[in-house]
Amino acid sequence: MNHSEELLKRLPNDIGGQPGAPIQRSEHQYLPWEKRCHALADILDMRKIVSTEEKRRGVESLGAEMIGKLTYYERWVAAFANILFQKGILTPGELAVRDGGGSGAPLSWDGRMTLAGALVSCTFLGLQHGIDVDHVAAITDVTSIQRTPLDATRCGLLYAVGHAATVGTPGSRSHYAEALRSAASLALDGARDRHDAGAPGTLRVQFLVQQWRGADGTRPRTLVDRRPSSPPTGQGRRSGHGYGPKSSLSLGVLHGIGAETPTQLSVLLITSNLGGIQNGILGLSVFALGMFVSNMVLTTAATGVFSISKARPAVFRSLAAFTAAYSLWIGIKMMAG
Amino acid sequence: MHPHDHTPVVAADEAPGYYEIMETAVRELLVAKQIISAGEIRRHLEVLDSRTPQLGARLVAKAWVDPEFKKRLLADGRAACEEMGISFYENTELTVLENTEKVHNLIVCTLCSCYPREVLGLPPDWYKLAPYRSRAVKEPRAVLAEFGTVIPDDVEIRVSDSTAMIRYLVLPRRPEGTGNMSEEQLAALVTRDAMIGVVPVEFQNGRVQ
């Protein structure tokens, strides 16, 4: 077996049974920071944030060269940083700011990502995200209740514009950070209180409550004419108006802030690792563009199907019931995390 | 004993290194985000400092003098520790392996450094380094010989490879001539390395070695 085959079959940690040097009975005097690092590892394990096995794999994924060059606890801390980036709990930018440049440029979690490759990935993620479950649910809801195909297309378009605008032009770092924080809260998956996640988490839950209530067969009335924090009332169900242009746009904006799907988490992880806020915005912009394109295709398709079926009330009713049930299911799934 | 292979022991007032700064930054960010608290890190440092091989030695000595305790220790190491007031902070099982006339046990972690920290504290450097991890499972007799331990050919050597979930502790054989000793005196004979399985517990001519 040649050297590369050996490397393929054995990960760096897997050395049991390999030949080795004589044993030096060396003892180690733990430095204070190494003890703190050990305590941190135990606490992360106890709090179910990073398990012992995840830590071991994190060390392994540093690669044989790094494993050979770093000391035991240096490997641990490098692994923690990468694992916490992957989970969206910390961002490379935060770490670089916090340590005052002490640990240099942000780590990239696969070390090989190029800007061009990442932008292509972002575009494809955008195309995919445009047909993610929450978009399908929203667009079918929005378009199905419009009187004319033109209205439906306009509302679908406004949804796409609102959503793309929110994602693609963060405007400030704070939006970007908030979106990441929101992603982190999802990634933590109950590891801590959802309330800590702040506004985006709250918005997400609010949106899903609306989505869920709206999809119970009666259709939602408005999304943003009501204050997000107002308790659900029966009144809304009886008031007569459906999704208008304004609420479609707002629904898109709200989706941009709050409703995370795996695709959105992926794009946030990629863009946060591109290095620099400009590259991050560029990544988000091409993502938004891809999403806009696939949303328009989806809107056109939904409008067409609904307007054809409107001639046959029975078909339209069952189609509407089906999309409502679908939205209900997506809403419950996302609420349940 | 010489210090770690890579890192020289530095004076306390030396400027913190790259990875030390990174550790501080990661920990402080997690505290700032209220994911962990500074207090729990501090309390856990005290827990780590309180874990030394003396705890393991107490278990071994009690097992030597109390056959009922020994049964419980071998049946469920973690439960027996908790009975002695030794809490587990990691979510692990503890399997205690008894050395006999016919069987000698040795523990290792080939993948990393899994170790019964609750009862032995932090592992020695050589336990975490490649030579011991790679060779212990392949040529345990040669490895033991490098620790000055020669196991007769008619004694079976069992090597147990630890995992993140299952940790091992060796229950060494009680040395000859210790029949009149108290549990505390016996505990003083038991060393960390004997509970890893690389050396026996020794007692000769009334003199502790």
Image: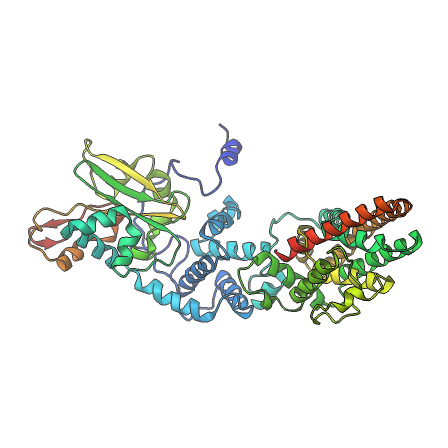
> Which quadrant would residue A215 be assigned to in this image?
bottom right
In depth, the one of A128 and B20 nearer the eye is: A128
Can see residue A8? yes
The image position of residue A278, as x and y in percent, is: 74, 61
Q: How many marks?
A: 0
The image position of residue B1, as x and y in percent, is: 28, 55
In depth, the one of A313 and A257 nearer the eye is: A313
In depth, the one of A251 and A329 nearer the eye is: A329
The image position of residue B22, as x and y in percent, is: 52, 62
Along the horizontal axis of the image, is A293 left or right of A204?
right
> Which quadrant would residue B53 be assigned to in this image?
bottom left
What colour scheme was applied to this rendering of the protein?
rainbow
In depth, the one of B31 and A34 nearer the eye is: B31
The image position of residue A334, as x and y in percent, is: 65, 55
Along the horizontal axis of the image, is A278 left or right of B165?
right
Compared to residue A30, the image places residue A129 above or below, namely above
Along the horizontal axis of the image, is B42 left or right of A327?
left
Along the horizontal axis of the image, is B18 left or right of A145?
left
Name the residue located 41 percent from the left edge and 47 percent from the top edge.
B112
Can see residue A91? no
Q: Quadrant of the C terminus of chain A?
A: bottom right
